[in-house]
Image (spheres, coloured by chain):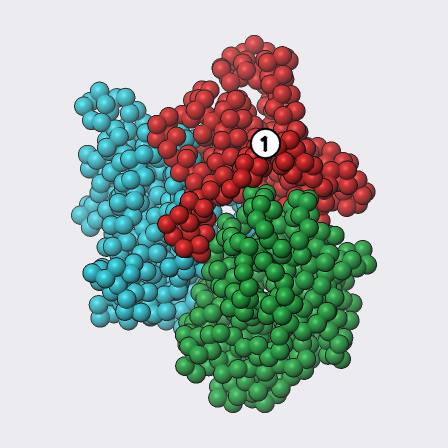
């Protein structure tokens, strides 16, 4: 024990001796690399690091730590990065509840935070901050886009379901914000539930003509597999979170034909995206997911802003971020007043691919969508 | 039994060897070491390590609470996360309403929360005391594995309630945007916050030492070792256990309250069965039924998390291995290794 | 709510109960005979699912995968028993909880190390896809029916084994008097390894069959483990009969609660709120059931010994 303590003290002394170089920029990445849902964090990291390697700057240092999807761990890591490493920029968090634990106090301490995935409503509205930039989407965006699409396509009587937690209820609220038709039913399931037999029976017993569901991660895999063997044959819709390339591999053919909304897709035609998908696939041996694309965009946005200013010059760096002068893999990209994206959202369809199903772009769901919370933001 | 009050310490000085046992020395060194490490870190300009020391003190405090039920009372509770989480939620709900200036629970005649630590702590302990009393009433009728499982069941109930009740964040949890206040002190200063946590840890240790040295402690020990004999002596074991369980829940709840302010955040994970397991690991790793065992366990776990986590992505694998080795080959825990076997097993 | 919907939900409840029984029977046997409380039982469930997904992916045969999954789980169980668990029988519950908690960490992180963090791909075999129409107009998934059938076979098999075979006799003897059967010259450590491996194999079988319906991912065993503990506590620890009845009770109550509670609250709330409150209460329901049963019967419904 005493030995451990003195080792701790020794390390403490060593770290104070290290003086950071003024020109250098330190980026702290906190993301989920272990535990449930870690494929999201792994892809955010791999996308981000791909952009960093391609830029090959020797004055940018990226520190990566695993939050194990636990808010208290994430919070500790953020403190460690800010207090001990003096990072200029934080990024990487995948989950909204972790972002809510870390972001409000981090940005108030003068650190920049760029979100590569989570977009909780509070951070877009009441708690928006000049140092907080969301490079992915506000959480409701993909749901809203599907609401628009289904309304436009005249899809009738959807049965909608989501887990009983804030992102789930917000998601369905976002969907209903734009879908005005009649619903066949509305269900909230237990978070982390893996058996949907009871829900599927209810859907069959209702007069539903379509299904809209938001069940991220493993929950979506279970749902789709059980949906296939339940003998139901209704058109299925959802946000991209249940249909990334890794989940499609696990679900298999059950997901073919499903339509989902995403702000990015791997067959989107623009030179930046083609180069990104090629180099990512070559390096990692897998097709990138939307999370990888968001990590890639986040890194490129940071790099573009670093060309203009050092984060120590907060006002100039903030301005450079807000200008968003970088080539996004999604094509057009700009920030709204609350530093959340205004962007197009696409509709993709799952098709039988080469060995495993994959997404194919079928159209635009909605153009230039902005989040519903911008009015509450006082920026 | 470790002694912390000054009368016994001064007696130790006049009688050099026998009064101060090896366990007491180890405890003293651990406590002094923690306080010293925090102060050195503060003056070296490393608030991160001060926060780490606060974390150790708070987790140790949660362990001290559980140790009273588990170590001294033999009540193997696998649901102490319920108290840890409730303590945390009380503080953050109070702070949430103080921040928004709305009445608690949305009920008009209730006060608009508070951002003062002391009333929040008292509320947290009261809430945990009431809940522990209720859980104890039902659970203490069972014993052995059934007690382990029924305490787990109650914690799971509260966990699912927190996950699905939207008013206070549900699964997303509830952040505390500004750390709560303690009279004139600057609580955002890491060392001040460490001082508060450390003082409460000392208080709790002193309190446990006192009640275990008193008649209550003797009765509780007997209720664990030989309840029949206690009953024949005219003392009902169940009320004794009930009181120990309530105090235990209140101390763990206080730790939860501090933990919420340290992290600036509470979430349902504070109520999860993994959290119960972790508090239990700290107590057992440190040494069951040793006054400062939870402190030793907390130091070991936090240091391992910090340094193993820096070495490998798969640190939990090695953490598991280490815990397993301790259980198999060092059954007395860290205190058993450092201070020899307990006097009364 | 139609009768056929209720019938279908009952079947769903029974199917969940069957799966819980596969988990709970091993847990309760290990506790009844060896007095061990094993938190790491969910890890065997996970092992079964991962090996099945891996073998089925490599060979293309679900059945080969299923067999190797169950066997691998049993083998893992045997190894764990010999290396670790054997040393815990004489320890108190506290040490057992802590050591098996450590095993969970080792298994979960080790599995992630081996297979990576992405979920694996395992599909329902071709011959069992689709659904059939049962009498009463209920359309039901063939695969889920097969799971129920498998549960019946396992339950009958366990009953026959325990009441008719020499191994079963020893198990019963071990439940009644642990010291005695050692004194009678039975090779007790082999018996213990066998029982532990049997329990692990059943958990592996459960994980493998459920893996095809749900997600094969790290941590998949933990929610099931907690449910299985609820089952054996309700049923009475050590009792196979208690495990069977507890499993069906928990399966049916959980499933029907999820359906009926939101509808119940719709009687006096608006639909959105009712769905939320109903779902919240439904997720607490089985723990409530357990607390109520233990409050009145502190040793469960069919206490074997304690």
Image position of B67 with respect to A270: above or below: above
Measured as percent of width and height from the top left, residue B59 is found at 38, 52
The residue lying toward the viewer, choosing from A379 and B125, is A379
In-image side of C152 versus C177 (left or right)? right
Label 1 Cα crowd, 10 Å radius (few <14 / some 14-19 / many 20+): many
Q: Which residue is mark 1?
A: C18
Quadrant (top left, top right, bottom left, bottom right) of the C terminus of chain C: top left
The residue lying toward the viewer, choosing from A341 and C299, is A341
**Residue C107 visible in this rendered orientation of the protein:** yes
- Shown colour of chain A: green
The residue lying toward the viewer, choosing from A87 and B160, is B160
**Residue B195 visible in this rendered orientation of the protein:** no
Residue at 28%, 21% in the rendered image: B228
The chain whose colour is red is: C
Image position of B285 with respect to A79: above or below: above
Residue at 63%, 63% in the rendered image: A155
Measured as percent of width and height from the top left, residue B301 is found at 46, 51
In-image side of B153 versus A364 (left or right)? left
In-image side of A31 versus A250 (left or right)? left
Residue at 43%, 31% in the rendered image: B145
Q: Chain of mark 1?
A: C
Q: Which residue is the extreme one toward the top?
A: C184
- Shown colour of chain B: cyan
Residue at 41%, 71% in the rendered image: A105
């Amino acid at each position: 024990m005493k030995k451990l303590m003195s080792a701790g003290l020794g390390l403490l002394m060593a770290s104070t001796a290290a003086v950071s170089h003024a020109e250098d920029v330190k980026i702290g990445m906190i993301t989920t690399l272990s535990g449930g849902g870690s494929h999201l964090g792994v892809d955010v990291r791999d996308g981000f690091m791909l952009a960093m390697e391609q830029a090959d700057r020797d004055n940018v240092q990226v520190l990566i730590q695993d939050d194990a999807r636990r808010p208290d761990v994430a919070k500790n890591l953020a403190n460690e990065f800010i207090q001990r490493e003096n990072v200029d920029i934080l990024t990487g968090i995948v989950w909204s509840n972790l972002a809510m634990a870390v972001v409000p106090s981090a940005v108030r301490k003068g650190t920049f935070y760029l979100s590569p995935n989570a977009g909780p409503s509070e951070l877009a509205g009441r708690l928006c901050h000049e140092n907080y930039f969301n490079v992915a989407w506000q959480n409701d965006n993909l749901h809203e886009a599907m609401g628009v699409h289904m309304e436009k396509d005249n899809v009738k009587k959807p049965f909608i379901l989501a887990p009983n937690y804030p992102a789930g209820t917000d998601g369905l609220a976002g969907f209903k914000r734009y879908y005005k038709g009649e619903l066949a039913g509305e269900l909230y399931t237990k978070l982390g539930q893996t058996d949907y037999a009871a829900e599927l029976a209810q859907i069959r017993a209702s007069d539903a003509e379509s299904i809209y569901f938001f069940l991220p991660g493993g929950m979506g895999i279970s749902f789709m597999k059980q949906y296939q063997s339940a003998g139901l044959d209704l058109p299925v819709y959802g946000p991209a979170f249940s249909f990334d390339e890794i989940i499609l591999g696990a679900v298999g053919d059950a997901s073919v034909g499903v339509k989902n909304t995403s702000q990015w897709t791997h067959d989107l035609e623009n030179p930046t995206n083609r180069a990104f998908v090629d180099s990512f696939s070559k390096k990692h041996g897998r097709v990138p997911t939307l999370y990888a694309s968001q990590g890639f965009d986040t890194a490129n946005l940071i790099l573009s802003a670093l060309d203009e200013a050092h984060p120590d010059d907060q006002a100039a760096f903030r301005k450079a971020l807000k200008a968003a002068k970088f080539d996004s893999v999604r094509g057009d990209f700009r920030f709204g007043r609350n530093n959340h994206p205004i962007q197009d959202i696409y509709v993709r369809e799952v098709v039988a691919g080469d060995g495993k199903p994959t997404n194919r772009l079928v159209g635009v769901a909605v153009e230039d969508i902005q989040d519903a919370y911008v009015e509450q933001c006082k920026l | 039994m470790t002694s912390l009050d000054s009368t016994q310490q001064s007696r130790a000085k006049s009688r050099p060897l026998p009064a101060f046992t090896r366990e007491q020395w180890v405890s003293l060194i651990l406590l002094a070491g923690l306080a010293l490490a925090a102060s050195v870190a503060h003056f070296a300009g490393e608030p991160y390590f001060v926060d780490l020391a606060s974390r150790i003190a708070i987790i140790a405090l949660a362990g001290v609470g559980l140790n009273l039920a588990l170590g001294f009372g033999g009540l193997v509770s696998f649901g102490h996360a319920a108290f840890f989480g409730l303590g945390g939620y009380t503080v953050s709900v109070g702070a949430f309403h103080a921040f928004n200036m709305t009445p608690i629970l949305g009920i008009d005649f209730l006060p608009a929360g508070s951002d003062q630590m002391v009333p929040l702590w008292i509320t947290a302990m009261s809430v945990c005391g009431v809940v522990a009393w209720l859980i104890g009433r039902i659970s203490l009728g069972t014993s052995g594995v059934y007690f382990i499982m029924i305490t787990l069941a109650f914690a799971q109930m509260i966990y699912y309630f927190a996950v699905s009740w939207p008013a206070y964040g549900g699964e997303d949890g509830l952040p505390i945007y500004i750390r709560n206040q303690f009279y004139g002190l600057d609580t955002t200063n890491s060392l001040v916050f460490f001082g508060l946590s450390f003082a409460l840890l000392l208080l709790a240790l002193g309190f446990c030492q006192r009640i275990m040295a008193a008649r209550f402690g003797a009765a509780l020990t007997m209720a664990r070792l030989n309840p029949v004999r206690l009953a024949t002596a005219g003392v009902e074991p169940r009320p004794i256990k009930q009181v120990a369980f309530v105090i235990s829940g209140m101390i763990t709840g206080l730790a939860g309250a501090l933990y919420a302010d340290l992290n600036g955040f509470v979430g349902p994970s504070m109520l999860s069965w993994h959290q119960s397991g972790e508090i239990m690991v700290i107590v057992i790793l440190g040494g069951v039924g040793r006054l400062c065992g939870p402190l030793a366990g907390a130091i070991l776990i936090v240091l391992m998390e910090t340094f193993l986590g820096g070495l490998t992505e798969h640190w939990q694998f090695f953490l598991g291995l280490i815990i397993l080795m301790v259980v198999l080959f060092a059954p007395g825990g860290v205190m058993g290794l450092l201070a020899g076997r307990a006097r009364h097993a | 709510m139609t009768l056929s919907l209720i019938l279908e939900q009952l079947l769903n409840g029974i199917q969940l109960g069957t799966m819980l029984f596969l988990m709970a029977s091993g847990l309760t046997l290990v506790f009844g005979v060896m007095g061990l409380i094993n938190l790491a039982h969910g890890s065997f469930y996970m092992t079964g699912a991962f090996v099945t997904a891996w073998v089925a992916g490599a060979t293309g045969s679900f059945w080969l995968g299923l067999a190797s999954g169950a066997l691998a789980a049993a083998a893992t169980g045997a190894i764990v028993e010999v290396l670790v668990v054997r040393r815990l029988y004489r320890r108190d519950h506290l040490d057992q909880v802590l050591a098996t908690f450590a095993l969970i960490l080792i298994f979960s992180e080790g599995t992630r190390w081996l297979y990576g963090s992405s979920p694996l791909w395992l599909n329902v075999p071709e011959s069992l896809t689709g659904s059939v129409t049962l009498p009463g107009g209920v359309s039901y998934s063939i695969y889920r029916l097969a799971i129920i059938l498998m549960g019946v076979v396992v339950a009958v098999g366990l009953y026959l084994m325990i009441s008719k075979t020499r191994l079963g006799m020893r198990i019963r003897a071990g439940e009644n008097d642990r010291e005695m059967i050692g004194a009678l010259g039975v090779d007790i450590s082999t018996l213990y390894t066998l029982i532990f491996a049997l329990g692990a194999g059943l958990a592996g079988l459960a994980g493998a069959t459920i893996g095809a319906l749900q997600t094969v991912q790290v941590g998949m065993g933990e929610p099931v483990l907690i449910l299985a503990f609820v089952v054996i506590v309700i049923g009475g620890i050590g009792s196979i009969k208690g495990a069977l009845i507890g499993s069906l009770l928990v399966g049916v109550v959980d499933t029907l609660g999820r359906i009926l509670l939101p509808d119940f609250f719709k009687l006096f709330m608006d639909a959105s709120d009712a769905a939320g409150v109903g779902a919240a209460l439904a997720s607490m329901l089985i723990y409530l059931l357990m607390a109520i049963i233990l409050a009145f019967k502190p040793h469960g419904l069919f206490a074997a010994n304690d």
